[in-house]
Amino acid sequence: MQHFIVNGVRIACQIAGQGPGLLLLHGLGGSHDDWRRQIPEFARHFRVVAPDLRGYGDSERQEPYTIQQHARDAGALLEALGMPRAHVLGLSMGGAIALELALDQPGRVAGLVLANTAPSFELRTWQRRYLGLSRILLALVFGVGGVARLFAKAVFPAPHQERLRRRLLERASHTSRWVYIASLRALIRWDAEDRLGAIRSPVLVIGAEHDYTDIHEKRRWAALIPGARVVMLPGSRHRSELDAPQEFNDVVSRFLGRLPQS
């Protein structure tokens, strides 16, 4: 792991490979470790940058934990690495950060991959209200490990995924409940749907068959992005990068391989 001072905060980052830049942004409660099945594969063709977002993993804890601040950190990290332009792949909350980066600093984003995410996490439906409020309550009472215990079986339900469940629980136990709650509260207040038409980067939207929102919803908002493509991963759930890594990697690699590399 390498460390960089970004916007006054120490950010931990795993870097691998050579070539065009590829920034990987993890989701809520995660870390660079979430990309362990992607980094070796993508490093064959790209200079892969996988940070721990501020407050997560080995990065320093310092407010604010807003989507906008994470996007500013991402842009500043690329600048610190001498990468004025890179492809950006974000999962879940990382997808929100990737979207915000593409909207706020469009010149930095060569290609954009949005996996199992949305342009708004506002609590508009009963399902979103349940997911959001139950996670906040569980984190307050039992910590992030309590959240992980509730959702690990839903995310990795198969018997052969026991190792994935255990690793999820182990990583969650090291995440601050206060960072998690602050991030979640910021996420459910964030909304970029009315700005999607301003995105100019080539965009791939990846949706798992059994994600929290279905592929029809993803196709609906993806249609607001000029030229965006949508791909569904059959049988996968919210953590496609881990439960369907080969299919996930192939879809991302094919998309990025068609784009101009600079």
Image (tube, rainbow, N blue to C red):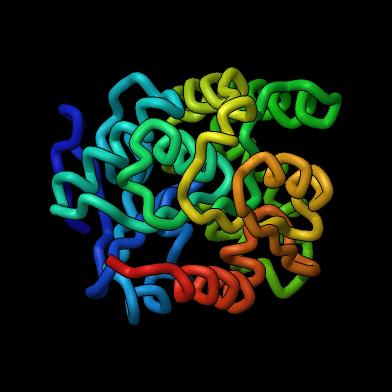
In this rendering, the answer to whether 121 lies above or below 239 is: above
Question: Which image quarter is the C terminus in?
Answer: bottom left
Residue under the image location 74 percent in, 46 percent down: 218
Q: Position of residue 55 (x, y in %)?
A: 35, 33
Q: Position of residue 2 (x, y in %)?
A: 17, 55
Residue under the image location 27 percent in, 60 percent down: 14
Q: How many marks?
A: 0
Closer to us: 188 or 163: 188
Residue under the image location 22 percent in, 38 percent down: 76
Closer to us: 49 or 20: 20
Asked if residue 28 can be seen in this view, the reply is no
Q: Position of residue 199 (x, y in %)?
A: 50, 40
In this rendering, the answer to whether 17 lies above or below 156 is: below
Answer with the quarter of the image where residue 178 lies: top left
Answer with the quarter of the image where residue 144 lies: top right
Q: Is residue 34 left or right of residue 83?
A: right
Q: Is residue 260 left or right of residue 85?
A: right
The residue at the far bottom in this view is: 44
Answer with the quarter of the image where residue 158 lies: bottom right
In this rendering, the answer to whether 194 lies above or below 28 is: above
Closer to us: 42 or 129: 42
Asked if residue 98 can be seen in this view, the reply is yes
Residue under the image location 19 percent in, 29 percent down: 7
Question: Which image quarter is the N terminus in?
Answer: bottom left
Q: Position of residue 253 (x, y in %)?
A: 50, 74
